[in-house]
Amino acid sequence: MPEYSDFRSDTVTRPTEKMRKAMAEAVVGDDVLGDDPTVQKLEALAADVMGKEAGLYVPSGTMANSIAIKVWTRELEEVIIESRSHIYNMESTHMTFISRVTPRPLSSNRGAMDPEEVERNIRKPSVHIPRTSLICVENTHNNWSGAVVPMENLKAIREIADRHSIKIHFDGARVFNASTASGIPVKEYAKIGDSLMFCLSKGLSAPVGSVLVGPKESIDYARRVRKALGGGMRQVGVLAAPGIVALTEMVDRLKEDHERAKKLAATIAGLPGISLNPEHIQTNIIIFALERSRISIPEFLTKMKERGILALATTGGIRFVTHKDIGDEDIDKAISAFHEILGG
Ligand SMILES: *Cc1c(COP(=O)(O)O)cnc(C)c1O
């Protein structure tokens, strides 16, 4: 059996040679005591790239989102959030567990919440009713097949937030994918959020980490929250160093992931049993439904695995994700496997 073509997620990428070298050579200090120069360099670089005052390196995107919500909310408050979002569905309820606030999930058009509905759901606090203090947006939208949420929609939500003095946290785990697909600079997306987090460990291929960016005062407080959550790390320059490589050298290649995902989506969309609109595939995530009378999801995944291909089940069906370690030959291998398993 050759090595698997691993389409489970863009988190499975291995660090590049250059990242390994950067790790080996990283100048380090004790970051909790504030003297790891490599982490400081990454945080300053991230803030600069996003046009924010300050950045905070954290072990995961989930921790970045947890900290952001803790920073912008107090107990007895409510957060407006898209109902299929990663924060609401995939982060083990840190909103209630850590921040002790309630989510108010809203439906959307492929990740874009209706601004009027957002405004209607901003609640005036009373003895019965919590105050709405935060809106979370996500772009690209993971569970909507990596959809790029339109800028006009995000701007309309920003306007509403301003009118009601409410903060916005931008879950930009894949904001570089959004920028690559739309041509809109990441700084423009970052303006939508009071804070934004992005992952170094997904399409950008770093082994570990995410960065939360925002106003200096809020990031100072976020640093205290990170410590309280056990996320203060010591000679962590060894992890930040490949993050710098990710941010400076891995953004431009994301377009290749998008091209490969589109090619795969266009080819499999017509196959019997697959429900997929290839026009919905804008970035590196393909989610499709399978006709159950034809084949079950576990059976399909087993047959893929027998053919050297890994993918994951998700809400709405099956997910294939392209990334640095998926090349043209992996796409061809997957296309053959789809034909073999489904016919057509
Ligand atoms: C992956 C992801 C996260 C969380 O990142 P982890 O590093 O896996 O904790 C948050 N939001 C979105 C949209 C994601 O895709």
Image: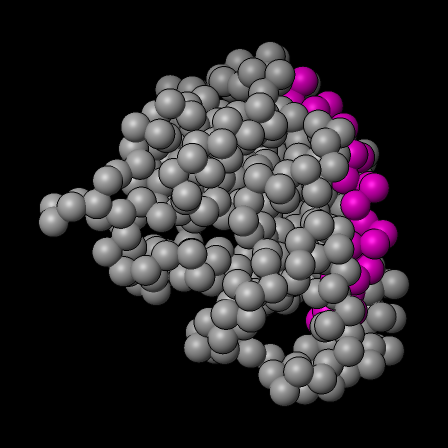
Residue 334 in sight: no
Quadrant in which residue 201 is drawn:
bottom right
Residue at horizontal 66 percent and vertical 31 percent from the top? 283
Relative to 136, does residue 235 appear above or below in the rendering? below
| Dominant SS type (magenta) | helix
Residue at horizontal 74 percent and vertical 64 percent from the top? 44
Percent x, y of residue 43: 70, 65
Figure coloring: one colour
Residue 202 in sight: yes
Q: Is residue 253 found inside the magenta-colored segment of the image?
A: yes
Could you tell whether 171 is left or right of 44 in the image?
left
Percent x, y of residue 297: 44, 33
How many numbered dots are placed on residues in this image?
A: 0
Relative to 104, does residue 277 appear above or below in the rendering? above
Residue at horizontal 56 percent and vertical 70 percent from the top? 220
Quadrant in which residue 30 is drawn:
bottom right
Relative to 215, does residue 111 appear above or below in the rendering? above
Viewer-closest of 7 and 88: 88
The range drawn in magenta is: 239-266
Residue at horizontal 42 percent and vertical 20 percent from the top? 291
Percent x, y of residue 315: 41, 35
Quadrant in which residue 166 is drawn:
top left
Viewer-closest of 83 and 293: 83
Percent x, y of residue 31: 66, 81
On-image quarter of the C terminus: top right
